[in-house]
Image (cartoon, rainbow, N blue to C red):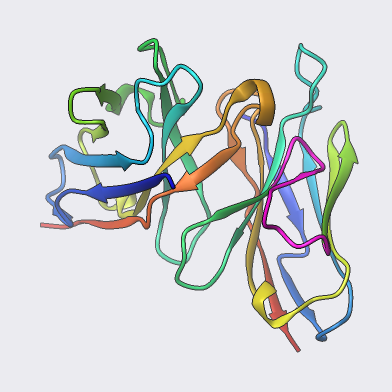
Amino acid sequence: DVVMTQSPLSLPVTLGQPASISCRSSQSLVYSDGNTYLNWFQQRPGQSPRRLIYKVSNRDSGVPDRFSGSGSGSDFTLKISRVEAEDVGVYYCMQGTHWPWTFGQGTKVEIK
Amino acid sequence: QVQLQESGPGLVKPSETLSLTCSVSGGSVSSATYYWSWIRQPPGKGLEWIGCMYYSGSSNYNSSLKSRVTISVDTSRNQFSLKLSSVTAADTAIYYCARGDDITVAGRGAFDYWGQGTLVIVSS
């Protein structure tokens, strides 16, 4: 199985400051069709996960533009340009390239 | 607006079969555009993909659970279901149903709608 490794696992951030989460896969996530199937989900406390980003860098409608995804191959990053209080939660990367689909361990974002 | 709602027993005895249903509103499980998945989360832990089913009837399962898992779709009720056999305490988790978005647009594994989740405890 492809192992997704996120870092850090805990990320205390000051309001208004940037935050960055790394996600690395044990294999390249480039699929045979040339696409890279790396998604990011946000799980706020007590809520179901919510998709933020699909195919590395495509932001969902309704997701603030302070969120951005980047990367290629096996190295990916989710960035929050200016953290707001509503961004508190756990962020997961997930690969859909290889069976079985696998999630990272999650990164907990909290306010300092 | 698409909505998904899980239902089923909150307590299952060890060695028995866990059965959950996901009711879909605002969309059709027989749509060729989407696929239907189950994902679980042990209390206080991360997410684990269980499997998914496509409108064609084909399915894919997590190899770690494959011999115990069955996902099926009931188009007449606009529902899909999960059965997990021979459960142990390790299967205690919040179980989420989710819709997989149009693969031609969002790609693989891009779940766009999730249920609220249902906690299943495996205990005698």
Up the image or down, B95 lies above or below A85; here it is above
For the point 78% across and 28% down, which residue is it? A36
Count of picture labels = 0
Q: Residue at x 56, y 32 (%)?
A: B101
Instruction: Locate residue B103 relative to residue B51 in the image: left or right.
Output: right
Q: Position of residue A99 (x, y in %)?
A: 58, 23
Figure check: A2 above or below A92? above
Q: Is residue A96 left or right of residue B14?
A: right
| Camera-nearest residue between A37 and A58 | A58
> In the picture shown, does residue B100 fall above or below B10?
above
| Boundaries of the magenta span | A53-66
In the rendered image, residue A3, in percent from the top left (x then y), is placed at: 68, 38
Q: Please check the rendered image and state whether residue A6 is part of the magenta-colored stretch, yes or no.
A: no
- What percent of the width, then of the height, locates residue A62? 67, 57
Q: Looking at the figure, which quarter contains the C terminus of chain B?
A: bottom left
- Can residue A97 be seen here? The reply is no
Q: Position of residue B69 (x, y in %)?
A: 30, 28
Report the predominant secondary structure element of the magenta stretch.
loop
- Residue B104: quadrant of the picture: top right
User: Between residues A45 and B101, which one lies in front from this camera angle?
Assistant: B101
For the point 23% across and 40% down, which residue is it? B21
Whether residue B37 is visible to the viewer of this picture, yes or no, is: yes
In magenta stretch: residue A64: yes
